[in-house]
Every structure is written in structure tokens, then in C-alpha cells.
Image (cartoon, grey):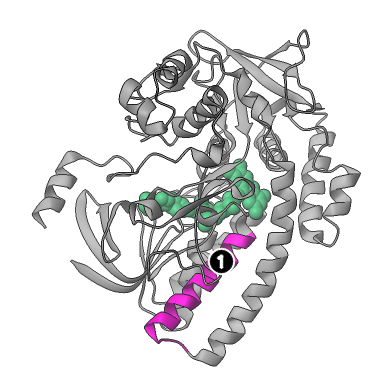
């Protein structure tokens, strides 16, 4: 088994910043990511294997490229295409890479695995052509692939403006943008609240102007209620909603599109910290179940830190500063680095973090979901797509005395498939909350088990032999 002083899981803004900070202070660092390029969700890069780098690099991609260049110039060991599928005592990681199983024990471990997007289920949502914003972005920015020609975007908050602008740049026709709330992110009220965050305001305005220039309609108080198609998406039925996002009967209309892109916010990807025994707490504002940590980013497990979305949804700037602070904390725990330098760096990070968190509060407010959004699920809607379990089956399980994720799983198999409940767990929690009248903060996430993501059985067998 390998040993390393500082191991960082996740090469997004949080993990990159942590690695740079720890590396600059001379720490022995390994940075792992399951993808084949660094950058995570925000700083996505084209794979190294792409020899034709045609097309303009986005501003964030260019910023990410600079950070990655700095990182590569240092002594940090970067292991890409490396999935962490298990976490065992003493901060021991089980990893899968190059068809091989390996274990790495970290003296200090920083987990920065990011977030997943909020899923929304409604009739037809499993049709090819219905996708989440992050997936559409990954196709366009990472792979230079246009997901569709005629697109409707639906969601809450400013991120879908960015995705819409990326679709327009890539040559798609954005047929409509549906915002569930009453005000666009660029409304006067939101602009006043964002006062002082000039960079973010300018960015939002640029997206908005591009959308207006393209003549794209923008409809506040609208959501999708049904996706229609035979083998793939052909149309989306959309409807007006009231202030609580309840559908107004008789307002449905149909948009003929081949792509529906959903952006209803994020959920912390906390499977790895929970597997390691870190305590979670429910914080609706921060995205639901988040990994509890102190202001040094240390969790309830000694020597294990979290940074970025896994500890609460806050955006890329928050993630980066938390990454730096986690690295400084682990350097201190190892007795490494020049304390004077660490203090200076920490002070700078804490100032930037406070500012980034102020802006994050504003975006989270724009993205706050109203429970009636989930009324679009009908009894026939598939809720667990891995095991093909529909809402009716889940409701029957809840009525049968199973108002927990585990109870529903045992009775229906929902959550037992390859995604291990990452997609359906949140939707089932919503169903339990409304049917059994239990608050979401009382509905515990299901216990994660290794492997947290699929690995071949031979990897498990090889790990047992080690
Ligand atoms: C469509 C969209 C638009 C967005 N626009 C903005 C924006 O304009 N401004 C903004 O501030 N934020 C934006 N965000 C949010 C932003 O992407 C995140 O805040 C930021 O990426 C969080 O950084 P992170 O390092 O915590 O996680 P991530 O960037 O998600 O990085 C996590 C990394 O961990 C790796 N990983 C996860 N699990 C494992 C594992 N088991 N083994 C190995 N590796 C693993 C992943 O491969 C990933 O590379 C947007 C997000 C989306 C989806």
C-alpha cells in the first residue's frame, strides 16, 4: 500500500487550489480525479488527447488552464482517470485506475468531490434529449459536441443563463428559457443585491445581452410538466406556475424541441465523507445534507478535510478558498510550511472567502426551490431509472410503513442500481416528506457502501487480495 502526506480527491476549483497551496509550501501531494482532465465542473478542459483545439476557449476554461499549468510546473503527483470507490479507516483510499486496484493511505486527506445536480422527474423525463445543465455543459465545453439543435432550458437562478449562452455560442437555437421564479437574475432587485460584485454582475449581464440579441424568449414563472416523444424527445409541455410554483391549470403549451436542459441547483456529493464516517448535518440553504466541518475545513474525522460543494453549495470562488484553507490546515497538522507564509496566505483566503460567501448567499436565494415543483411527478413517472421503479411503487412502500430511504429501497429496489441512489434518493425524500408529513431534515440519506461508483468485480477481488 502506498502512503502519502497529503492526498486530495477531486481536481475541480477546490482540489486544484488545495493542491497548489500545499505544493507551494513543499508538501508531498497526490491529486486524484476520476476524469481524464483536470478542472472539475467549472474549469473544464479539453482532453489532452484532442489534437484539434478548435474553437474559442471560454474565460473560465482559460483561468483553469492557467491554474493547471502552475500545478503541472510544481512537484504535485496528478493521477487522472482514477476513481476513489472506497474509503476505509486511517484515511485509506481504495482506487481504481488503469484497470488496476490500488490502496493509498493519506496522512492528511482533503475530499473535494463537488456536487451533483438536483434531478427533476416528470412524465417523459427519461427520454434521450432530456438532460441536466452540467451534462450539456460538459458536452459543449469538454467535448465540443452540440447536444441538440432546438433547445429549451428550464430551471431557477442564473446558471441557466450561462448554459443558454453556451448553447447560442455553439450554434443551437434556444427556443425558450423557463425560470420558475418571478424575477430574472438580472432584475433590478437582484442587481441591487449583487451591488459591489462587479465581475459577477458583468458576467451575468453579458449572458443576458447575448440571449436578448439572439431573440430568445425568457419566461419567468414557468416550468416543464411533460416531455413527449417516441424514442427521443420531440416536444416539451410547459406551464405557468404561481408564486409557490404550483401549476396554473389551463396554461399548458407545447414547444417542439429536441433538447430539454434542466438546472434546478445542486446537492453536495457527500458519499465519500459519509463512507469515512464524517458527520453530516442538514442545511436547506447549503443544499441539504452537507458534511459538517469547522472553520479550518476539518470534519468530525481527524485529519480529514472537505472543501468546495461537498461541504455546502457555494460556487467556484468559495470552493477555491476553502481548498486553500483545507491545505493550510493539513500543512499545519503535519508541521510543514513556513508559519509566517501560511498565516499571510490564510488571511488573504479568508477575506476572499467572506466576499465569495456573500455572493453565494444571493445566488442560493435565486435558486431556492419550492416543494410544489415536485408535484409534476405523476404515479406513472419513473423515479429510480436504474431499477425502473415508478412513483406509485414508492408511494405504496411508504404507505406500507417505510417512510425512510432504506425502507423504500428494501421494498422496491429503488437506489440499488448503478447510480446507488444518487439520482432517485433526493426524489424519494421529496415523496416521503409530502406523503408521511416528515420534514426533509428528518429523512436521513441512505448509508453509502463501497463501491460508491461502479467498478469491475475483478477490482474488488484484487483489493481483497492486497
Ligand atoms: C451548468 C453549471 C454552470 C455553473 N456555472 C457556475 C458559475 O457561473 N459560477 C460559479 O461560481 N459556479 C458555477 N457552477 C458551479 C461550479 O461548477 C461549482 O461551484 C464548482 O465547480 C465546485 O467546485 P468543486 O471543486 O467543489 O467541485 P467540482 O468542480 O465538481 O470538482 C469535483 C471533482 O471531483 C471529482 N470526483 C468526484 N468524485 C470522485 C471520486 N469518487 N473519485 C475521483 N474523483 C472524483 C470529479 O471528477 C470532479 O472533477 C456551475 C455548475 C454547473 C453544473
325 lies left or right of 106: right
Residue 352 appears at what percent x and percent y?
68, 70
Nearest the eye: 317 or 376: 376
Residue drawn at 57 percent across, 36 percent down: 439
Q: Could you say whether the residue bearing mark 1 is in a helix, strand or loop?
A: helix
Q: Residue at x 54, y 15 (%)?
A: 124
Query: Which residue is tagged 1?
Result: 322
- In this view, the residue in front, 49 or 428, is 428
Q: Is mark 1 within 8 Å of ligand 1?
A: yes
> Residue 202 location, x and y as percent?
81, 54
- Residue 320 in which image quadrant: bottom right
Please tell me whether residue 326 belongs to the stretch shown in magenta: yes
**Which of these two is toward me, 324 or 271?**
271
Taking 353 as reference, is 363 above or below it? above
Is residue 456 rendered magenta in the image? no
Q: What stretch is highlighted in magenta?
A: 317-337
Q: In which quarter of the image is residue 303?
A: bottom left
Position of 367 with respect to 37 (left or right) is right
Relative to 263, residue 269 above or below: below
What is the x, y in percent for residue 119?
54, 31
Q: Is the magenta stretch mostly helix, strand or loop?
A: helix
Amino acid at each position: 500500500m502506498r502512503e502519502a502526506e497529503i492526498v486530495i480527491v477531486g481536481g475541480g476549483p477546490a482540489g486544484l487550489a488545495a493542491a497548489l497551496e500545499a505544493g507551494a509550501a513543499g508538501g508531498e501531494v497526490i491529486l486524484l480525479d476520476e476524469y481524464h482532465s483536470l478542472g472539475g465542473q467549472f474549469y473544464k478542459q479539453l482532453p489532452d488527447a484532442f489534437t484539434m483545439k478548435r474553437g474559442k476557449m471560454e474565460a473560465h476554461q482559460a483561468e483553469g488552464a492557467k491554474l493547471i499549468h502552475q500545478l503541472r510546473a510544481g512537484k504535485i503527483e496528478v493521477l487522472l482517470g482514477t476513481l476513489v470507490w472506497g474509503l476505509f479507516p486511517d484515511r485509506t483510499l481504495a482506487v481504481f485506475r488503469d484497470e488496476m486496484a490500488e490502496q493509498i493511505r493519506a496522512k492528511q486527506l482533503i475530499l473535494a468531490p463537488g456536487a451533483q445536480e438536483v434531478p427533476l422527474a416528470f412524465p417523459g423525463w427519461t427520454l434521450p434529449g432530456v438532460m441536466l445543465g452540467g451534462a450539456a455543459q460538459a458536452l459543449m465545453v469538454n467535448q465540443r459536441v452540440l447536444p441538440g439543435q432546438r433547445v429549451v432550458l428550464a430551471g431557477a437562478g442564473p446558471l441557466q443563463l450561462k448554459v443558454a449562452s453556451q448553447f447560442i455560442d455553439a450554434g443551437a437555437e434556444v427556443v425558450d428559457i423557463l425560470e420558475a421564479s418571478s424575477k430574472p437574475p438580472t432584475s433590478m432587485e437582484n442587481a441591487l443585491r449583487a451591488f459591489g460584485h462587479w465581475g459577477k454582475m458583468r458576467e451575468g449581464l453579458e449572458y443576458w445581452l447575448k440571449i436578448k440579441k439572439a431573440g430568445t424568449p425568457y419566461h419567468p414563472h414557468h416550468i416543464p410538466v411533460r416531455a413527449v416523444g417516441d424514442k427521443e424527445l420531440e416536444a416539451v409541455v410547459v406551464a405557468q406556475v404561481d408564486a409557490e410554483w404550483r401549476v396554473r391549470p389551463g396554461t399548458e403549451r407545447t414547444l417542439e424541441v429536441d433538447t430539454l436542459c434542466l438546472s434546478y441547483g445542486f446537492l453536495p456529493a457527500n458519499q465519500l465523507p459519509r463512507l469515512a464516517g464524517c458527520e453530516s448535518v442538514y442545511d436547506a440553504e447549503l443544499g441539504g445534507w452537507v458534511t459538517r466541518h469547522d472553520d479550518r475545513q476539518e470534519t468530525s474525522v481527524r485529519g480529514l478535510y472537505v472543501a468546495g460543494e461537498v461541504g455546502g453549495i457555494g460556487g467556484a470562488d468559495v470552493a477555491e478558498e476553502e481548498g486553500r484553507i483545507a491545505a493550510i490546515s493539513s500543512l499545519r497538522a503535519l508541521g510543514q510550511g513556513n508559519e509566517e507564509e501560511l498565516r499571510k496566505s490564510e488571511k488573504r483566503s479568508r477575506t476572499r472567502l467572506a466576499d465569495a460567501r456573500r455572493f453565494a448567499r444571493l445566488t442560493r436565494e435565486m435558486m431556492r426551490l419550492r416543494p410544489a415543483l415536485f408535484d409534476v411527478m405523476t404515479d406513472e413517472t419513473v423515479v429510480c431509472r436504474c431499477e425502473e421503479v415508478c412513483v406509485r411503487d414508492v408511494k405504496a412502500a411508504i404507505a406500507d410503513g417505510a417512510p425512510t430511504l432504506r425502507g423504500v429501497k428494501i421494498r422496491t429496489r429503488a437506489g440499488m442500481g448503478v447510480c446507488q441512489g444518487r439520482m432517485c434518493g433526493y426524489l424519494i425524500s421529496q415523496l416521503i416528506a409530502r406523503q408521511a408529513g416528515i420534514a426533509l431534515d428528518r429523512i436521513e440519506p441512505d448509508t453509502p457502501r463501497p463501491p460508491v461508483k461502479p467498478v469491475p468485480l475483478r477490482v474488488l477481488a484484487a483489493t481483497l487480495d492486497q
